[in-house]
Image (tube, rainbow, N blue to C red):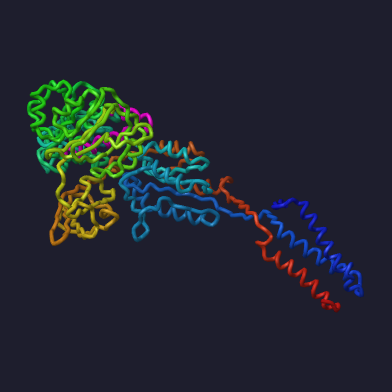
Amino acid sequence: MELIADISWYWLLLWAFVSIGAAWWYYQVKGWLNDISSWKRYLLFGLRSLGLFLIGVLIAGIFFPYREYDKQKPMLLLVLDNSTSMLNYADSAEVKSETPIFINELKSKFSQEHEVVVFPSPTEDENKNILFDKKKSPISQWFNDVYANFYRRNVGAMVFISDGNYNQGMDPTTAAKALKNIPIYTIGVGDTVQKRDLAVAGLNHNNIAFLGNKFPVEVSIDANKVTKNNVKIWVEHQDKVLEEVSVNFEDKKFQTVKHTFYLEAKKVGIQAFTVHVEEVPNEHNYTNNSKTFYIEVLDARSKILLLAGAPHPDIATIKSTLIKDQNLDVESVTIKNLPSNLAIYDLIIWHQPGLNMTAEQREQLLNANKPLWLIIGTSTTAKHLQELKLPLVLQTTGKTDEVRASLNAKFNKFELSEKTKDALSSLPPLTTHYGNLALNATFDVLYFQQVGTVVKETPLFFFGNFNNQKIGITFGEGLWRWKFAEFQRNKSNDGINELISKVVQYLAVRSNTNRLRVVFPSVLAEDEPIRVSASFYNESYDPITTVDIALTLINEKEEKTNYNFLPKASNYTLDLGSLDAGRYRWEANTEHNKERFELGGSILVRKVELEAADTRANHPLLERIAQNSEGRFYQFENRNQLFDELANREDIATIAYETVTYKKPLDFLWILLAIGALFALEWIIRRYNGSY
């Protein structure tokens, strides 16, 4: 037996001699009980010696291994595709009625020696019939969930029932490869015969359009075993045909035709458009002959003027971010091409202000009274700042300096995400004037200048209001370096993009004076949860959570449902769950100090139609998954053959896991009782023979 001790074993040997010596002295040297027989005296001597030695063993701190065995039965996982496409085939009635029976048989045959788990649990009705009601088939996600939930478990095999079609996530064969050493048995539902069918297979469009503009919609039509000329494709909006074309399909088993419609945005709000393809005789599935898409029509965009004293990569960096925002109309010019009408712009971003500027242009910009974001580089001089009447005094020798950005934790004009703060925490320096910068007005500083490890009181990126004009100032050039450095570090430009977007949003957008704010999604799918947030501000525009905020949701039948927001740390939340497809109006209201505040809006819940397009099962995918994992593929009608296959696999067995813990003799009561029994027996024998 393996033993571990805190002291050397020689000390235990020495203690054995001490124990024997003590007992010898007690019974031989003192001569106690000399009148009893020798064997009794040796028995007492032995009992005392052993008892003293065991006490020493307890004190010595000896440890010995204590082994426990935990047996884990093999697990059989059954993963069921519970999507609506499982009922798109000729065997749909059999699949719906026989699948619960198959699951119950699997449990009854194997539950005694196996742990049978159905994952994820399918939705059922009161009669335990599986509903097959899921709107999507994310097969790769199911496999990833199996890996996350059952990694390092004794999974003997996995059974996967599906038609093999997936419409979300990556190729399932890649996700299945992560389930190493787990044989996957696939059971194929449906058939792989190509059927006669016309389908609106794909729509490619923007989510936002602007009032009065035309927007493109690319339509893809898939045709299977269809030979027909002049097949009509049309787009409807509010039961009115907007545009119609005819296409021809040749004699092929499968072909795709694409056409681009150019539709005009005529009404503000979320607009629903439906693309139809003409129904032809003997189609297998007519539900996929139409598809609806949604466009949010806005009545205006914020116009941004990017103005530069001379071409510079900073301008390209800012522009590359802003043009991604469809709510912004971005125009980039140099100072010599300054537009004559500045009133149409909501924000002017001016790089190197003053450079190459004429007196007339200076007066035009000063009189425009538009929000400004000034990026003051080394070509902007102290004289330029004075001529522009900016509340800045620059004292410089003409030399340049390299300064880093140090975030001001007290800045509260807008919030940057923690991810962005981290991404921008170690950026390269900006190039700025060497000298002193004095401010003749109150500014809110986002970033201070940092030289080496020293954070200066001089601002680098700051905001303020001057003569009723919003101003943002970046006292340095080199934003393009921030973009490249962030991408090199994080393989993305999310941080610099968020910074630029937040700056533009703060400067260009008018302040919301309504103290009740509600963030409600405008368009989402019927299977997506709806989470709403709200905020309320007191007279000082500090967020408070002491008021009650109510929400009323109104569907297309004018039926109303009332809710109440739940307060959190500084705002409110409300989880509406998922809603049926359709249009809804919402109204939020609250009262504070006898003053009523109201907000309203609309939401469109779109129908998910991904599963309707599947008319042909993808059994080759299921065969590959089974083959790659050393499993087997079965047609649904042959599913019961799987029972014999699973029963005959010798590698699906119970596993015993050994757990070893090291314990001291003091941890066991019987050892203490044994020591007590030794001394008790010695005492009884002594008393019986006339001694104490």
Part of the protein shown in magenta: 479-508
Taking 14 as reference, is 65 left or right? Answer: left
Quarter of the rendering containing residue 568: bottom left
- Indicate yes or no whether the magenta region holds residue 595: no
Can you give x and y, in whole percent of width and height, for residue 270 in the image?
16, 43
| As drawn, 251 above or below 439 | above
Quarter of the rendering containing residue 250: top left
| As drawn, 203 above or below 94 | above
Can you give x and y, in whole percent of width and height, for residue 104 in the image?
45, 56
| As drawn, 125 above or below 487 | below
Is residue 56 among the parts visible in the rendering?
A: yes
- Indicate yes or no whether the magenta region holds residue 487: yes
**Viewer-closest of 637 and 461:** 461
**Viewer-closest of 662 and 636:** 662
Taking 691 as reference, is 221 left or right? Answer: left
Taking 595 as reference, is 133 left or right? Answer: right
Can you give x and y, in whole percent of width and height, for residue 281 in the image?
21, 38
Can you give x and y, in whole percent of width and height, for residue 549 in the image?
20, 58
Residue at 41% in and 43% down: 188
Q: In which quarter of the image is the C terminus?
A: bottom right
Is residue 277 among the parts visible in the rendering?
A: no
Taking 408 as reference, is 105 left or right? Answer: right
Q: Tell me which secondary structure the magenta stretch mostly adopts.
A: helix
